[in-house]
Amino acid sequence: MVKKLDKVLYTAQAHTIGGRDGAGKTSDGSLDVKLSSPGSGKPGTNPEQLFAVGYSACFIGAMKAVAPKINVKVPEDVAIDASVSLGPIDAGAAYGIAVKLAITLPGLDDAQKKLLVETAHQVCPYSNATRGNVEVELSIA
């Protein structure tokens, strides 16, 4: 079942040409990137890299949003090392991605880290978008 937004808070708009070997630019001009296929050696970034940055940034935002509700302070030096893998699925009939987020929360005890990460994973828009569709592995460093 598709979940619909109760209310639109923000809409990002981008224009992309040429696919993996093209370019993309947001409507406000804040992002303007040359694209290249993974492993091609050509200049540019690829969609998996963009997804890794987007998911990890969003997840940190989700941790900051839920932290006051569970009485945990997100450390100033919170960090996420994100890996987004691309590969065949369905016996090679299609392609999919898998995500690994290695979350570093210095200064918190193990129980606080676990509570913060699990709670954020329930509200993060990227987590909700991937849930049931993409293998997502969370680890706490």
Image (cartoon, helix red, strand yellow):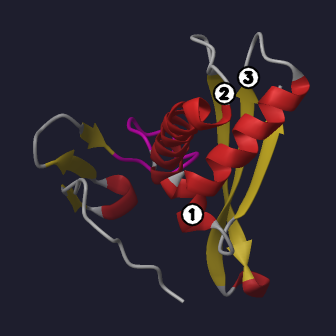
Q: Amino acid at mark 3?
A: Thr
Q: What is the quadrant of residue 56 in the picture? A: top right
Report the predominant secondary structure element of the magenta stretch: loop
Q: What is the quadrant of residue 120 in the picture? A: top right
Q: Measuring from the top left, give residue 127's x and y in whole percent.
A: 60, 57
Q: In the image, which disc is placed on residue 128?
A: 1
Between the C-alphas of marks 1 and 2, the distance is: 23 Å
Q: In the image, which disc is placed on residue 104?
A: 3
Which residue is pictured at 25% across the width and 55% down the height? 9
Residue 135 sits above or below residue 84 on the image = below
User: Crowding near pointer 2: few (<14 within 10 Å), some, many (20+)?
Assistant: few
Asked whether residue 139 appears in the rendered view, the answer is yes
Decide which of tag 2 and tag 3 comes sooner along the chain. Answer: 2
Taking depth in this image into account, of 115 and 49 the one nearest to the observer is 115
Query: Seen in the image, is 85 located left or right of residue 50?
Result: right
Which residue is pictured at 18% across the width and 34% down the height? 30
Q: Amino acid at mark 2?
A: Asn
Q: Measuring from the top left, give residue 70's x and y in whole percent.
A: 67, 35
User: Crowding near pointer 1: few (<14 within 10 Å), some, many (20+)?
Assistant: few
Between the C-alphas of marks 3 and 1, the distance is: 21 Å
Which residue is pictured at 19% across the width and 47% down the height? 25
- The boundaries of the magenta stretch are 35-45
Between the C-alphas of marks 2 and 3, the distance is: 18 Å
| 120 within the magenta span | no
Residue 76 sits above or below residue 104 on the image = above
User: Secondary structure under badge 2?
Assistant: loop
Q: Which residue is mark 2?
A: 71
Q: What is the quadrant of residue 91 in the picture? A: bottom right
Query: Seen in the image, is 117 located left or right of residue 51?
Result: right
Asked if labels 3 and 2 touch by Cβ distance under 8 angstroms, the answer is no
